[in-house]
Amino acid sequence: MSHRTRQKVSFAVAVFIILGLSLSLYSTPQLLYAQADGSDVSKRRAELEAELAELEAEITVQQALVGSKQRERVSIERDVAILNAKIDRARLEIRARDLSIEKLDSEIRGKENTIGGLNEKLDRQRESLAQLIRKTNEIDDFTIIEIVLANENISEFFSDLDSFDVIKRSLNESFYEIAQTKGYTQEQKEALEGKQSEELELRGLQELQKRKIEVQENEKQEILDITKGVEAAYQQVLKSKQKSAAEIRATLFVLRGSAAIPFDRALTYANEVSVLTGVRPAFILGVIAEESNLGENVGTGNWKTDMHPTRDQPIFEDITNRLGLDPDLMPVSKKPWYGWGGAMGPAQFIPSTWILYEDRIGRVSGQVPPSPWDPRTAFIASGLLLSDNGADRGGYYNERLAALRYFAGWRNAEKPSYAFYGDEVMELAEKYQGLIDILAQS
């Protein structure tokens, strides 16, 4: 066998080694993800989901207990039982949220493993591609005449041509595979970022829930300290706390990002919005009050540091410019440690949501352009969004769901982790309905 023939035989062997390497590297990104998501991770995830289901069932029991107790005659026993049930429910929700965070941690680790595996695969594919390119260059160094003369028979010549063809196809496949793997790696990275944002948001909600428990514990202790457990004393305390219609009207209604207004005026706005949207006045008051109760960062943010830089800052600057306001002086919510701030006024709209409703708010309010910091306009904005969220249908379920959509968006509204917001809004709505009823009787 001639030297040139031996060289071509060696070359053919190298070709098939490379092809074998390429085939061994070939596995779909989805298959690689399945391999990274090992049996231990899947098992732990299943355990967490089972434990979450049990906790959610217990939370439902506590919710039902609160509802049944609220229908009983007012007494120390009843009110302490309600507070205990609320505290137990809040603690269960915190535990459930802890499990959700742990489950997210598990998913995040799985995605990180997947990304690591995909990056390793990309490195192997690039090396394989480099080898194929080097061999292709070797092929290109041969002329057709040299290839024919190097072969001792015609069948070997066509066999070599087939090998060349296979290498060319393998190159195309390798280019495609690298592009596909890079695309899937990017998808996994974006999914990972979404999971991490959700985890941070849940951790922030934990702090809100813990503060709520402290308030409820203090409220319960206050009842017991004042009455020493004596029913007659408790009834006397309740009687002394009942407000007259005049006191209710004069009570200040706290607004987030704006000055407080008398309750009587807040109710006037809520009634006006109710006629326009079909949303119950007490429920509107409950939502706006809950927005003011969510934290101490009320109106203490700055749009340049606390607001999403590309989604909201340009819109905020446009809104304030058209209102003739200095954006640096307008109160917005401070960025919490787990996400972006920048919500405006009592209704707490972020600029990118406000701009979607601006024309409707302007038509209904008669204020063009409408201001998120004007109390009446904020009530109208809140009512329009709540109506779009389904609150105009009325009833406990529809109102609570609308509140959750207001807070967490439609995608997250029915997640147990956000349930506390809907529960607290409905409790506030019940409180304000009681005040409205007193005013109606005066």
Image (cartoon, rainbow, N blue to C red):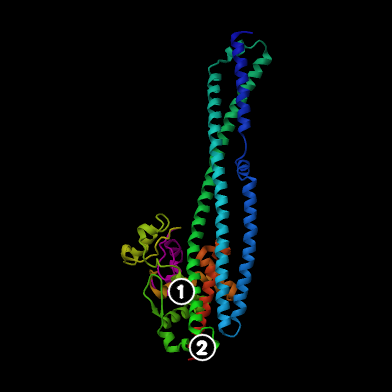
Tally the numbered discs. Answer: 2
Amino acid on which the number 2 mark rests in the picture:
Ala
* Mark before the other along the chain sequence, 1 or 2: 2
Q: Is residue 124 at all visible to an observer of this figure?
A: yes
Q: Is residue 399 at all visible to an observer of this figure?
A: no
Point 58% across, 12% down: residue? 146
> How far separated are the C-alphas under marks 1 and 2?
30 Å
Q: Where on the picture, by quarter, is residue 324? A: bottom left
Point 58% across, 72% down: residue? 398
Other residues around mark 1 within 10 Å, as few (<14) / some (14–19) / many (≥20): many
The reply, left or right, for residue 440 in relation to residue 61 is left
Q: What residue did someone put label 2 on?
A: 233
Q: Secondary structure at mark 2?
A: helix
Image mark for residue 289? 1
Indicate whether 366 appears above or below 176.
below
| Extent of the magenta region | 339-367
